[in-house]
Structures are given as C-alpha cells and as structure tokens.
Amino acid sequence: MSIEIQNITKRFPGYTALDNISLKVATGELIALLGPSGCGKTTLLRIIAGLETADVGSIILENRDTTNLPARSKNVGFVFQHYALFRRLNVFDNVAFGLTVKPASERPSKQDIRDRVMHLLKLVQMDWAAKRYPSQLSGGQRQRVALARALAVNPKVLLLDEPFSALDAKVRQELRRWLRKLHDDIHVTSIFVTHDQEEALELADRIVVINKGKIEQEGTPQEVYDHPANSFVYNFLGNVNVFHGRVRNGKVVLGQPLPDERRELNGHEVKTGQAFIRPHDIGISKIRNGNDHPGVIRDIRLTGSQITLELESAGFDTPIEAEISRETWRNLELSKGEEVYITLDKARVFTGDFEI
Amino acid sequence: MHPFSKRQRRILPGFGLSMGYTVFYLSAIVLVPLSTIVISTIGIEPERFLAAVSSPRVLASYRLSLSSAFFAAIFDAGAGFLTAWTLTRYRFPGRRFLDAFVDLPFALPTAVAGICFATLYSPATLPGQVLSRFGIELANTPAGIVVALIFIGFPFVVRTVQPVIAELETEIEEAAQSLGASRWQTFRKILFPHLFPALLTGVTLAFARSIGEYGSVIFIAGNLPFKTEIAPLMIMSKLDQFDYDGASAVAFVLLLISFIMLLVLNGVQRWQQKAYR
C-alpha cells in the first residue's frame, strides 16, 4: 500500500506545524520521520491517520484520496507513544477490539477472531499474556500488545508515533531490532516518528529529516548520514563539532583556515559560515603532518567502546571533541594535558547562518 | 508490608502521631455521636423497638425515603454524568461559572433550597400553575420530594465523575477510532466501563445522602401521613412527642441502611478494581 502525501500544510494558532510537505512512500517501505520535538513530524503522522485534519493538501492511500475520511474509515494502524491500551480490557480483548467493533456483516466469526488474535499475540511474543491486564505488563510488553492490536485489523499502513521513546535504553534497542525483523516478515508499509537519530538510522529503509514543518532531506540512512544536505541535517544526525567563522574561498576562516572536504565552495564571496566535522572523523597523532593543528588534551572520557577526547587548540574558540577507538588510544598512550596534532581534513563547510 | 512493621523505614516520620489524630477525630466527630444512637437503641426492649420501626406509618416513610432517593439518584446519574462530561471535555465561555454552580447544593443551607422549591412549585405561583396544566403536581407529592433530592444529590455525581473523565487520555479514544470503532462504540465499550466505578460511587453517595435529607424536602413534601412523610421527618415528629425510644429506633434503622449501602459500595469497588490495577 503506497502513501502519497501532497502539499500538506497545517497551521496552529501562532505557528505553522507543517509547511507544504510532499512525500511518497512505496509499498512495503519502512520510513522514519526524524526531527527535533515540535518540528511537526507527529502532526504529519496524525494527519495521515485522520486524527488531525490538514488545512491544505491531500493524503492518497493506494491511489485513493483519503484526506477527508475520518480515522475510523481509513484502515490505518496507529501505535501511540504511551501505548494507549484499553485498561479495562485484557490483552486478548485489546487485540480483538478492532475486529469486534466491525459491523456484523464484516465481522469474522468468534473462532476466527480467536485464531487471528492468538496468531498476532504469538507474532509479538505475547501469547502467554492473553488473560493479563495492561497494568500487569511492562512498558515493552505493552507496546508489543499495542502493535498487535494495530495489526489486527489488517491495516493498509502502520503508523508509529515515537513507539519506543517511553522505554528504557536496553528494551528500546531490543524492540527496535525486533520491529525491523517483524517488518521484514510482514511487509506492511510503515511510517514511524522519532527524534532519536540512532533509531532512525538503524531501523528505517528511508529517513525523512523534518525541521520546522519542512523536509530538510530524505534518503537512505547512509545517504543522509554521509551526505547531509545542509547544516541542520549534519548537526541533527550524530555528534558534531561546529566551528563558526567567515567563509572565504571555500575555507572557513577562524583562527586557522579550514577547507571544505569537497572543495566545492571555491570562489565564493565572503559569507558567514560554519565548518562541521564529526568527532570520529578527527584524526589524532603525535607527529605533525600536513595541515594538522596542534592541540592539548583537556579531558579523556570513556564512552563504551570509544574514547572521547576534549581538545583545545589555538584559534578555535570552542573545545574540539574527537572520538578514537580504544586501540588507537592505547597505541598512542595519551594522557590528560598532553600535546597532540589534530587532523581536521574531513570538515564540511556550509554557508549561511546556522540555526537549529 | 504490615503497617506497623518496624523494619520498613518511612521517609516522612510521624505515622504514630497522624494515626493518633485520625483515630481521635474519627471517634470524636463520627463514632461517638453515632454510637449514642446504637447505645440508646440497645436499651429499648425488642418488642417496643419492633413496634416503633414496623408501624405502618413508619414503614411507609421508609418506603418513600428509599424509593424517592433511588429515583433521584438514577436521574442524577444521567444528568450528573452529562454535566461532568461537558464541564471537563469542552472549553466554552462561562465554563468556570457553571462549574462553580455545581457546588451550590453543597453550600446552600438545605432549608433555603426547600423554601425555594416550595415557592417555585406551589399552585399559587406561575411555574407551579404551568406544570399543573401539564398534569405535573410537585407540591405535596412524592414527585416533589424526588425533585428536591435530585438537587441535593447532583453535585455528588458530578464531583466524583469529573476527575476520572479529566484523567482519561484522549489517546484512548483515538486508538479506538483508528481501530474502526464508531463514536458510540468507543463510548460504550471503552469510555463508559472506565467511568462506571466513579459513577457508581457518585450515585451511591447521592443516594445515601438523599435517604437522610431533611431540610430541603419537608417544605415541598407537605408531610401527609402515609403519603409524603419521609423517614427523617418521622424521627423529628417522634421527638416532638417526646418519644425518644421511638425516634432512636427509627434513626437506628436509617443508620443501618446507610452503613450497609456504603459497605456494599466498597465491596463492589474492590471487586471492580481488582483486575485492572
């Protein structure tokens, strides 16, 4: 089931939540809408589901204009951030709800409902809890029940609104992988909203980065991460060092000139601009080569498998963060206060004022 | 954990002190006054007790008090639920004003309400005449008593249901809708079961309060023996005749009824809550 979002605009008193958004989602795709909170991504999801109406634009589901259909007629599965399970119904009845409210002519027989519900509960690995009530389940379990409930009505599209953000890190990661696997098995066209770039990168076939009601970039996780279209995307996807300065001849002039990796901005006039470089793209060595900048290690932090160094260098007004592997760290035998040479040749330069 | 267990450390100290206060106040305010009825009733010989509470006139008053309180509570269930829903779910000009209005029956001296009703529905005034043209007589009839009791019980229902409606997440309704449920199905299958325990509590409170209501009823009831005499009035008239034993016997039965009802309510609620929390 393909989704076509055409020129959707939605204004709330005081601000524009969505500004002329258009997007196509192919059948069977898993799409992430990624953006900071308040960027309009949840509003877009709710408009697709029919829980909110757009001021302008249309939503086409499989060549059928569903813009003005109420939520109940859209046949869209919706998974909420806080599960929204029916507290007074047990797990089985929660999942069966969408089937039991169908008009008598379309409603499956009791036995068919039973079979379908149990099949779905098995799929989400919750069949053992059919008789339990939502309050007796953990957050992760509740969200899996909510997912089974949404799938029960055979939705054409599955929409998930920050489905894992209320869960703790470990469960979140587990559920993420599990959802990816589930999607590979059942292939229902899905859109999920998240503000967690890691989640989007790991889970989605395609990422749509949204900011202030506009699409900043869309592409595969690799495209978006490796070739960010602009400073916002660069900054939003992962940690980054930002150096502000003036761009002259493709270089950001700080204290030290910093060239653009791609050398595309040559011949530009003087403008304000920023250089971006990811911490793991920064090289650290004890021997100077080429354009390396001398610097001093101010702090060393252990972040799981990586070591984060905080560096200070003449000409940079903000400290530079670099990530190196444990191996490099051991080989270089670095310690606090030591002088090192910093390689910054993988910087990306964007002109214009930086805003987030 | 046992409430008196020494092992469990409390963050806020003072369990002993606050428990002491609670027991003291409950005793001084509730238990001691009520126990006087029990004690004075125990002193009555069984035959006299039975005679007092089973005289036809007293029985008629019990019947009237219970039935009119019941109908009033049923009416309050519907009206109070709707009011609570409207006040919680919608934003409209004058909402706060209306909301404050709900509490008036709590705050108003019941005698004032009684006089208002008596004046409003007497055959001598316009509203009473208009109603009687439609065949509705409220002055000196059980129907009038029900109207007064509806007024008294109303805020109990609204105020118990309101907070539960307020804490219902709209997401629950949205989930039901996205699963294909109509508004009516959403209400009947999801919202109403959720609100039912609170509604039941409110209705029972309204009912219990109405059984004992005196001030607002006697002016409109007319107090005709066997017809519009309510049970609390029987107590008053027995006191007027210096029949203290008879009065406490009637009072004892009323107390028993209230107590049993609250007990049943508690049981129902516990049974309701068991599965979900």
Image (tube, coloured by chain):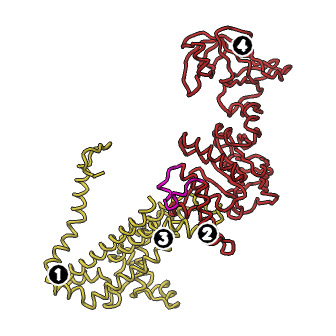
Chain colours: A red, B yellow
Q: CA distance from mark 3 to mark 2?
A: 30 Å
Q: Which residue is mark 2?
A: A100
Closer to the N terminus: mark 4 or mark 2? Answer: 2
The part of the chain drawn in magenta is: A124-139
| Number of residues whose C-alpha sits closer than 10 Å to that of mark 1, classed few (under 14), some (14–19) or many (20 or more) | many
Element on which disc 4 rests: loop
Q: Which residue is mark 1?
A: B245
User: Are labels 1 and 3 on one chain?
Assistant: yes
Instruction: Please state which of the two labelled residues, at mark 4 or mark 3, is closer to the viewer.
Output: 4
Q: CA distance from mark 1 to mark 4?
A: 103 Å
| Number of residues whose C-alpha sits closer than 10 Å to that of mark 4, classed few (under 14), some (14–19) or many (20 or more) | some
Residue type of the residue flagged with mark 2: Thr
Residue A324, placed above or below residue A1: above
Element on which disc 1 rests: helix
State which chain disc 2 sits on. A
Element on which disc 3 rests: helix
Is A54 inside the magenta-drawn segment? no
Q: Which residue is mark 3?
A: B80
